[in-house]
Image (spheres, rainbow, N blue to C red):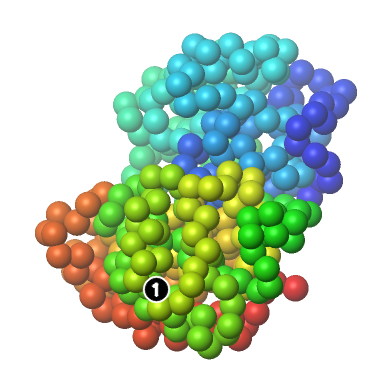
């Protein structure tokens, strides 16, 4: 991988080899797009690679040595505004744009930016806006990291033999960030929320029991992490926990969360952005899947353990359980999760 920093490193390469990548808006999907940049950089080392993204996910990419410059925007910015920012930051239209999100608006942004080539999946009736597309059915035929890289293969006619593991990059402020948050000594993180919906959330009372078991066996401080919208979920778990916890839910930025998570002994949580961050940091990780499929979106890393349901209704990919029973979590007991926790701890962090 080419070394460097993403924020300001514009080189003297010609305008003709400028490449724009429109990245996903969800935190976990953003992490899963990191191997795309490493493959693209490895195959086209002299290209100028730009990443267009929501400000929310920018911390995921800013440590990458495979990106020359970020073009961030806010959630309320429309396609016209985003296209204007792209043309301004790139000093004109990109030669090629890879459109990783499946939305119509992302393809429209690339078209309005007058990109010479526009590659993406043929989803959301956006085919006329693309110059090359892959059928929408192929998007879920394999892990999302592979689905993204397949767009590079379509563009340059080569075949990627091995998909890299997502890597967020170096974290220098982990200890300082933990201390600033009130963490002393060794700690583990529980990420019990999921922005997508409640069907992805393992029951809170089981997390309370799990916290007690981990804490008693290790002596580590339990830390809860999540967004402001998940505050009620974490508060209920803390109330039911048999040991004292530090609840950082809603109190840390994505940057701070990355720094704090990098120093954790273990992370356990639902299929959510947080667990993908942990996997990409090399932290021992246990992930619980309910309504979604690990075949498509499992976090990847050197020490990742996954529990998923064999219920006939899973995966349903619904935001809320359509049956109201949460049957997909019945067989994922606290004891089973704790067994995977012990295995992850025994294997240890990435060296």
In the displayed structure, would residue 42 be above or below residue 338?
above
Return the residue nearer the eye: 19 or 311: 311
Q: Tell me which residue sits at (48%, 37%) in the image.
A: 25
The quadrant of the rendering that contains the C terminus is: bottom right
The answer to which quarter of the image holds residue 129 is: top left
Left or right, residue 62 beside residue 221: right
Return the residue nearer the eye: 229 or 149: 229
Return the residue nearer the eye: 243 or 113: 243
Give the percent coordinates (x, y) of residue 349.
67, 74
Give the percent coordinates (x, y) of residue 126.
37, 25
Total of numbered circles in the picture?
A: 1
Q: Tell me which residue sits at (29%, 67%) in the image.
A: 203
In the displayed structure, would residue 203 be above or below residue 319?
below
In the displayed structure, would residue 228 be above or below residue 336?
above
Left or right, residue 289 beside residue 260: left
**Which residue is farthest right?**
12
The answer to which quarter of the image holds residue 345 is: bottom right
Q: Is residue 179 in view?
A: yes
Left or right, residue 163 beside residue 89: left
Q: Secondary structure at mark 1?
A: loop
Q: Tell me which residue sits at (64%, 60%) in the image.
A: 182
Q: Is residue 41 in view?
A: no
Q: Tell me which residue sits at (49%, 81%) in the image.
A: 214
Residue at the spot of label 1:
241
Give the percent coordinates (x, y) of residue 78.
46, 17
Q: Is disc 1 surrounded by few (<14), some (14 to 19) or many (20+) residues within 10 Å?
A: many
Return the residue nearer the eye: 121 or 194: 194
**Which residue is farthest left?**
323
């Amino acid at each position: 991988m080419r070394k460097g920093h993403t924020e300001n490193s514009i080189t003297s390469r010609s305008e003709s080899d400028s490449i724009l990548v429109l990245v996903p808006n969800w935190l976990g999907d953003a992490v899963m797009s990191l191997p795309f940049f490493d493959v693209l950089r490895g195959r086209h080392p002299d290209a100028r690679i730009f990443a267009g993204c929501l400000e929310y996910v920018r911390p995921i990419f800013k440590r990458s040595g495979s990106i020359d410059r970020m073009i961030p925007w806010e959630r309320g910015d429309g396609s016209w505004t985003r296209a204007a920012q792209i043309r301004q930051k790139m000093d004109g239209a990109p030669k090629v744009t890879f459109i990783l999100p499946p939305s119509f608006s992302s393809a429209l942004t690339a078209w309005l930016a007058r990109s010479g080539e526009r590659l993406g999946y043929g989803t959301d009736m956006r085919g006329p806006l693309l110059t090359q597309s892959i059928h929408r059915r192929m998007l879920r035929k394999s892990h999302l990291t592979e689905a993204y890289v397949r767009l590079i293969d379509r563009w340059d006619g080569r075949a990627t033999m091995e998909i890299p593991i997502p890597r967020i990059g170096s974290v220098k402020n982990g200890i300082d960030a933990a201390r600033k948050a009130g963490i002393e000594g060794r700690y583990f993180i529980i990420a019990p929320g999921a922005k997508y919906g409640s069907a992805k959330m393992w029951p809170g009372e089981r997390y309370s029991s799990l916290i007690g078991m981990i804490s008693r066996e290790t002596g580590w401080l339990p830390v809860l992490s999540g967004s402001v919208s998940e505050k009620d979920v974490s508060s209920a778990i803390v109330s039911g926990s048999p040991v004292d916890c530090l609840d950082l839910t809603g109190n840390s930025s994505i940057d701070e969360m990355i720094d704090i998570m990098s120093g954790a002994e273990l992370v356990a949580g639902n299929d959510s952005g947080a667990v993908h961050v942990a996997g990409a940091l090399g932290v021992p990780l246990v992930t619980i899947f309910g309504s979604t499929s690990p075949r498509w979106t499992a976090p990847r890393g050197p020490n990742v353990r996954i529990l998923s349901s064999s219920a006939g209704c899973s995966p349903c990919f619904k935001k809320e359980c359509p049956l109201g029973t949460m049957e997909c979590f019945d067989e994922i007991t606290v004891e089973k999760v704790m067994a995977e926790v012990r295995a992850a701890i025994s294997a240890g962090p990435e060296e």
